[in-house]
């Protein structure tokens, strides 16, 4: 199987990741819940992962890296922990449902008012409309760093500057960028950055988290045991325990730590260059095919993602044929990004998403192009 669904999760990971998980399964106990060698090994694994993640994004406060099961839980923690009744929030049409649904739920409850920065039919955010969306009660701008549908990268720094100029905070969903694009939290100006471990970071599923600036305080989403300050009747105010209730996934975080070690040694810039080369190769190969490509703009930065449809064919039918007839794994449908599909005019048919990763090769790209060509010829 040629795996081109890396925007959903990476299957191919550095071998060090699996080794670290296996070793932790055999020798890591319960982080912050014992003083045995095994329990201390778990605590060191978790602490080391915090430090590596902070280093990757240029953040000087690793204790304010809080781990969750995934980016969805991290975004829920940030959104429900930051917003207050009566707040106004701005988000974008680029967003994944892990941003849209928590905000929609708060809006349905009448707790917040919500506006969306629109995308046009070509897949561009209408940044010129951003300032007009702010109100005196705007509390936050919540935005993705890159569309999980088209791979188009947002101008996150401009979004952050606009938020701050109006006295609002900026929450960044880095699920699609961290690990495949250089991300500097301070340079961007994010007040909270949410991430997942199982995509471009090449770590295990069940790992993710949020990074909270020292100037920001969040109410915890989950309350419970932390292994420290157990006499306190409420969730501790100190970080990371403030946002981490329950036993940590030490085995998964050991794997994420190994993945971060690999990326830090490799350099994310190399990953970005590799994926961009593959994306360009793929786009060049599409020129002779009856393919409709979405969200591509010359000179605009992208991750290694291409969304398309073959003329006259349903996206799910194309993806099924790619997988079962040609051994090429992609993803079809709406990709949990309904507003982006509505902007592009693909809400009724979805799109086929090809997403490349560090372990994708030029031969993989060429095989995918040959498969698309074969499918297109059969229906011509």
Image: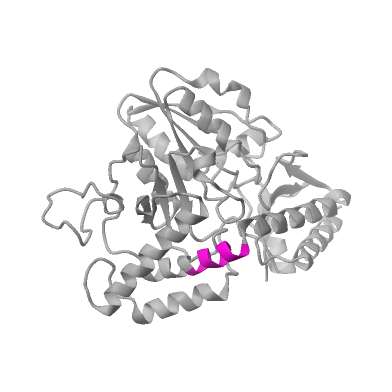
The image position of residue 61, as x and y in percent, is: 39, 50
Q: Residue furthest bottom?
A: 26
Is 122 in front, or is 159?
Answer: 159
Vertical comparison of 228 with 296: above or below? below
How many marks the image carries: the answer is 0
Decide if residue 60 is on the left or right side of residue 357: left
How are the residues colored?
Answer: one colour
Tell me which segment is drawn in magenta.
258-266
Point 54% across, 39% down: residue:
188
Please, is residue 349 above or below residue 28 in the view?
above
Please identify the residue farthest to the front as the structure is shown.
60
Residue 343's spot in the image, x, y percent? 63, 33
Q: Residue at x 48, y 28 (%)?
A: 163
Q: Give the vertical position of 129 relative to 60 (above or below).
A: above
The residue positioned 58% from the left and 50% from the top of the image is 177
Foreground: 183 or 19?
A: 183
Query: Residue drawn at (31%, 53%), measured in percent from left and top?
Result: 240
- State whether the magenta stretch is mostly helix, strand or loop: helix
- Specify whether 359 is left or right of 44: right
Quadrant occupied by the N terminus = bottom right
Residue 115 is situated, as x and y percent measured from the top left of the image, at 48, 26
Q: Looking at the picture, tell me which residue is in the foreground, 316 or 81.
A: 81
Residue 345 position within the rendered picture, expressed as x and y whole percent measured from the top left: 67, 35
Can the viewer see residue 311?
no
Q: Is residue 357 magenta-colored?
A: no
Q: Is residue 341 above or below residue 68?
A: above
């Amino acid at each position: 199987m040629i795996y081109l669904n890396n925007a959903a999760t990476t299957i191919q990971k550095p071998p060090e990741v699996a080794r670290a998980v296996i070793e932790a399964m055999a020798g890591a106990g319960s982080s912050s819940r014992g003083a045995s060698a095994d329990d201390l090994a778990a605590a060191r694994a978790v602490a080391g992962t915090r430090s590596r993640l902070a280093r990757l994004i240029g953040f000087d406060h690793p204790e304010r890296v809080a781990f969750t099961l995934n980016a969805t839980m991290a975004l829920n923690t940030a959104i429900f922990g930051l917003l207050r009744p009566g707040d106004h929030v701005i988000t974008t049409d680029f967003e994944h449902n892990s941003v849209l649904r928590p905000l929609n739920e708060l809006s349905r409850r009448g707790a917040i008012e919500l506006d969306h920065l629109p995308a046009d039919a070509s897949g561009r955010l209408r940044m010129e409309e951003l300032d007009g969306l702010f109100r005196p009660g705007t509390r936050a701008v919540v935005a993705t760093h890159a569309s999980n549908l088209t791979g188009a990268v947002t101008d996150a720094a401009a979004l952050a500057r606009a938020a701050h100029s109006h006295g609002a905070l900026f929450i960044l969903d880095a699920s699609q960028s961290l690990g495949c694009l250089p991300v500097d939290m301070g340079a961007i100006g994010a007040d909270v950055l949410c991430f997942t471990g199982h995509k471009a970071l090449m770590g295990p599923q069940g790992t993710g988290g949020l990074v909270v600036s020292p100037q920001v305080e969040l109410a915890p989403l989950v309350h419970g045991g932390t292994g420290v300050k157990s006499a306190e009747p409420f969730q501790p105010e100190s970080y990371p325990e403030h946002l981490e209730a329950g036993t940590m996934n030490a085995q998964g975080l050991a794997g994420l730590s190994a993945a971060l070690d690999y990326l830090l040694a490799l350099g994310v810039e190399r990953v970005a260059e590799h994926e961009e080369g593959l994306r360009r190769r793929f786009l060049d190969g599409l020129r002779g095919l009856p393919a409709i490509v979405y969200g591509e703009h010359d000179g605009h930065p992208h991750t290694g993602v291409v969304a398309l449809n073959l003329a006259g064919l349903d996206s799910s039918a194309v993806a099924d044929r790619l997988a079962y007839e040609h051994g090429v794994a992609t993803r079809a449908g709406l990709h949990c990004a309904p507003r982006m599909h509505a902007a592009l005019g693909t809400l009724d048919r979805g799109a086929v998403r090809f997403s490349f990763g560090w372990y994708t090769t030029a031969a993989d790209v060429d095989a995918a192009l040959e498969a698309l060509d074969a499918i297109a010829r059969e229906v011509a």
